[in-house]
Image: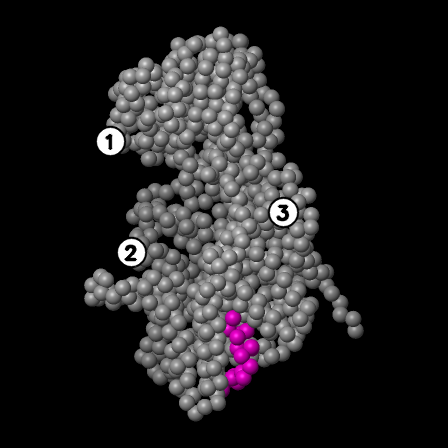
């Protein structure tokens, strides 16, 4: 079930909101857990069992870590099971491809396992729980309910943010969502919904058209790359806004996940603004345990390399994602090695260069595979056939592109603080959100309209 | 102290209540009475998803089936689609992937999965030499097989709307290509076979200079009655039947009531666009005889007449022939019209015509690669 769907907006959300109000604080956790399981089962009617299993394993591991003398053993076992889920469901095919690539095709059969929705997110949340218990930052919960809700809570189950257990431990036990939470949360949700439905979906059509071409003209290739750059930002940050908004409605304050990343002046800064929760997870549970920057330059570079490798790998079971991660890693290392001094000379230039570097990274990310990415990039520099821009979109596409570019940071950066303060929580802002809701509902209906000239038998 | 609720919060609350909580219960209560309003449109020409029934067999697919059902039957769907289409049309002058909004609100069909008329306009996917030879071979075999039964064979080509009204295409699509499949097929068949082929393109271009009225609907893929007359006149001339030209004063093109065509329906904007389009007919022309259609969608039809040409004519056609039927039917005593998707040679030979016409519009020229009895 996606947030931008009729079933979520008009059936699930109102029922869960009203039900949560009716059951009261005492039964809220169990009610929200049941709702979350239904939410997940709606998309994974059979494999919801995997998530339930993950909850049980991690809850038990947390208790064993805290209550026994074999803390490290049970942490390792818990993490191994969690990563085992990923290894089997996400990476088994990829590993088989590597082995077959080395030893010959069909050396081992390639498992065709469909990726369970959200497994990359809830698995990391589970690891966060047992790691925080191990480090003494959080107490293991004897009651499985808070742990179950933490891992499976529907707002951030599918696409994050990855919330560290320690940041919501108290909220799981004590929270009193009020009217202000409901209105602020719903407003945030509407911003996210608008980003996803009104901008990301339009950009997606353009990007899909561009990346679907075997050969594409220079201008069209750049337009397609820009479209994808905007699509992924508005899609992902829109989803995060919806998650944060929904969490707030139910009394949870989740950490921010995006902070106008395309305004970054360096790749290092980009990763402090883009998918912030993932960066925080890897910093907290990989980079720092490996020594961070405390063990000399060489070790720092290695640790960063590992983190970026894992970042790429986490995004997908393909070499193109690893390449994308390493691409960011190499630039980040170069910045540490001295490139940053050059970037600091001009804010405008550094932002532009960073944006272009990120854009090329997204081409690596979006293309079907590495050779398709190389082909696309060569088209960006003139190697492709001339392509009319109307093959990628229409007036609506160009207008929404302009809106998307302005909204991705320049507006927020250039707008005087006085106006921002006046706008925030004002009636015009609320009316604007009401309009967003209307346009989104109209767009969802429009997307369902699939007419034909002649009857389709 | 009593907490003060801000206007902003009240508006957001109203949005939540009206936009999230109320639509479904409201629709369940009064939705039936709201269906069929001005936004209802002419339908999508497909079967809408049905409400699935949960069972052990469809447990894993039930969510998808239910969402498909909800998508097709969501509350206030017609009005919301109309709102979105109207917004796109008025704000951006743009359209769905299937319809291009041209100048002066002329609409053009752009579906890539239904013949791809824009590709034809741009001169793409030209037939290869081998394909042209194969088409010629097929048509010749068909002609010979029909001739063995004393049946004349005529191939009739109708151009796409973009071909005739390219001046209303948006600037970014450029001028129509000088080399295109319609011209390829016509010239190859004309120059390399003795198959009787009728090109209505030149006749239509000529007719455009003789009347201020359009030959096509603005909001439909098809030609109107005047355009169909011009096409029919070209076909009938090949069959030895002369009809007066539209500027001879016998039949006069006139503009009549407002209408909204299939392209307006694709945009779900019939209610908005019907004021921009009109029926155009021939004043003075009266259809002779009677058409009897079999039941069903795109079913066969026969026209019965008297006092006209005694040859029996069988037309294997697409929807462009809908408007031609009155003119062809009035010119022959007996005529039968069958859509080529449902054509069966047994039906043809059963009818035992004197003339067999295969009518095809430009975007469906690929049919000529599979044509046969």
The residue at which mark 2 appears reads as A371
Q: Badge 2 local density, few (<14 within 10 Å), some, or many (20+)?
A: few
Q: Examine the rendering and report whether any part of residue B78 can be seen.
A: yes
Q: Could you say which is closer to the camera, residue B100 or residue B240?
A: B240
Calculate the distance from the C-alpha at mark 3 to the C-alpha at mark 1. 53 Å
Which region shows up in magenta? A135-152
What residue do we see at 32% from left, 27% from top? B372
Which residue ends up furthest to the bottom in the rendered image? A69
Residue A143: say if magenta: yes
Q: Where does the image place residue A83, in percent across and percent down from the top left?
A: 39, 74
Q: Is disc 3 surrounded by few (<14), some (14 to 19) or many (20+) residues within 10 Å?
A: many
Quadrant for the C terminus of chain B in the image: top left
A20 relative to A410 in the view: left or right: right
Q: Residue B33 at x, y = what percent?
A: 68, 43
* Marking on residue B76: 3
Give the residue at mark 1: B130
Would you identify the image quadrant in which residue B268 lies?
Answer: top right
């Amino acid at each position: 079930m996606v947030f931008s769907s009729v079933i979520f907006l008009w059936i699930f959300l109102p029922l869960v909101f009203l039900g949560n109000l009716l059951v009261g604080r005492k039964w809220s956790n169990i009610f929200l857990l049941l709702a979350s399981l239904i939410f997940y089962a709606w998309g994974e009617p059979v494999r919801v069992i995997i998530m339930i299993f993950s909850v049980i394993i991690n809850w038990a591991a947390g208790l064993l870590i805290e209550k026994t003398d074999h803390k490290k053993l049970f942490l390792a076992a818990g993490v191994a099971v969690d990563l085992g889920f990923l290894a089997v469901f996400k990476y088994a095919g990829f590993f088989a491809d590597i082995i077959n690539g080395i030893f010959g095709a069909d050396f081992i059969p390639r498992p065709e396992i469909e990726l369970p929705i959200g497994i990359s997110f809830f698995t990391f949340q589970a690891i966060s729980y047992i790691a925080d218990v191990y480090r003494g930052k959080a107490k293991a919960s004897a009651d499985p309910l808070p742990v179950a809700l933490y891992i499976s809570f529907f707002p951030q189950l599918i696409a994050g943010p990855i919330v560290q257990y320690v940041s919501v431990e108290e909220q799981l036990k004590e929270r009193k969502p009020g009217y202000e939470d409901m209105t602020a949360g719903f407003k945030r949700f509407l911003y996210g919904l608008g980003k996803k439905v009104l901008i990301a979906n339009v950009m997606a059509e353009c990007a899909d058209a561009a990346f679907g071409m075997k050969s594409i003209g220079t201008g069209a290739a750049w337009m397609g790359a820009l479209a994808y750059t905007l699509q992924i930002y508005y899609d992902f940050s829109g989803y995060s806004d919806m998650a944060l908004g929904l969490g707030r409605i139910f009394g949870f304050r989740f950490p921010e996940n995006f902070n106008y990343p395309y305004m970054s002046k360096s790749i290092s800064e980009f990763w402090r603004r883009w998918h912030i929760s993932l960066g925080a997870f890897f910093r907290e549970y990989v980079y720092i345990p490996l020594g961070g920057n405390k063990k000399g330059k060489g070790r720092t570079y290695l640790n960063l390399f590992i983190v970026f490798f894992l970042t790429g790998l986490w995004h997908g079971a393909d070499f193109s994602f690893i390449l994308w991660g390493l691409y960011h890693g190499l630039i980040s290392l170069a910045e540490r090695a001295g490139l940053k001094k050059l970037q600091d000379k001009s804010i405008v230039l550094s932002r532009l260069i960073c944006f272009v570097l990120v854009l090329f990274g997204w081409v690596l990310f979006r293309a079907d595979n590495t050779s398709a990415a190389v082909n696309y990039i060569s088209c960006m520099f003139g190697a492709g056939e001339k392509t009319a821009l109307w093959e990628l979109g229409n007036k609506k596409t160009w207008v929404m592109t302009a809106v998307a570019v302005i909204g991705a940071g320049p507006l927020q950066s250039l707008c005087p603080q006085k106006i921002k303060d006046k706008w925030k929580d004002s009636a015009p802002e609320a009316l604007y959100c009401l309009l967003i809701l209307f346009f989104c509902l109209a767009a969802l209906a429009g997307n369902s309209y699939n007419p034909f000239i002649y009857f389709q038998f | 102290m009593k907490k003060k609720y801000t206007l902003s919060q009240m508006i957001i609350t109203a949005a939540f209540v009206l936009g999230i909580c109320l639509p479904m219960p409201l629709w369940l209560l009064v939705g039936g009475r709201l269906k069929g309003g001005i936004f209802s449109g002419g339908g999508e020409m497909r079967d809408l998803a049905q409400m699935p029934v949960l069972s052990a067999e469809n447990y894993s697919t039930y969510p998808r089936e239910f969402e498909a059902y909800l998508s097709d039957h969501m509350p206030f769907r017609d009005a919301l689609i109309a709102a979105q289409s109207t917004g796109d049309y008025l704000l951006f002058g743009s359209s769905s992937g299937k319809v291009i909004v041209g100048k002066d609100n002329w609409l053009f069909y752009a579906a890539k999965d239904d013949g791809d008329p824009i590709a034809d306009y741009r001169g793409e996917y030209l037939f290869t030499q081998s394909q042209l030879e194969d088409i010629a071979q097929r048509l010749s075999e068909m002609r010979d097989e029909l001739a063995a039964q004393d049946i004349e064979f005529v191939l009739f080509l109708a151009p796409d709307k973009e071909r005739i009204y390219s001046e209303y295409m948006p600037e970014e699509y450029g001028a129509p290509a000088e080399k295109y499949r319609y011209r390829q097929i016509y010239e190859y068949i004309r120059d390399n076979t003795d198959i009787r082929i009728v090109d209505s393109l030149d006749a239509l271009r000529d007719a455009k200079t003789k009347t201020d009225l359009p030959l096509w609907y603005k909001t439909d893929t098809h030609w109107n009655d005047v355009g169909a007359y011009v096409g029919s006149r070209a076909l009938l001339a090949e069959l030895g039947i002369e009809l007066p030209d539209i500027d001879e004063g016998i039949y006069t093109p006139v503009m009549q009531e407002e209408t909204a065509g299939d392209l307006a329906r694709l945009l779900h904007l019939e209610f908005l666009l019907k004021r921009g389009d009109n029926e155009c007919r021939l004043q003075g022309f009266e259809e002779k005889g009677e058409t009897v259609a079999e039941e069903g969608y795109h079913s066969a039809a026969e026209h019965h007449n008297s006092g006209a040409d005694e040859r029996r004519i069988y037309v294997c056609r697409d929807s462009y022939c809908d408007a031609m039927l009155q003119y062809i039917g009035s010119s022959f005593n007996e005529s039968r019209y069958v859509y080529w998707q449902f054509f069966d040679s047994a039906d043809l030979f059963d009818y035992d015509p004197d003339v067999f016409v295969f009518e095809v519009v430009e975007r469906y020229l690929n049919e000529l690669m599979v044509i046969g009895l």
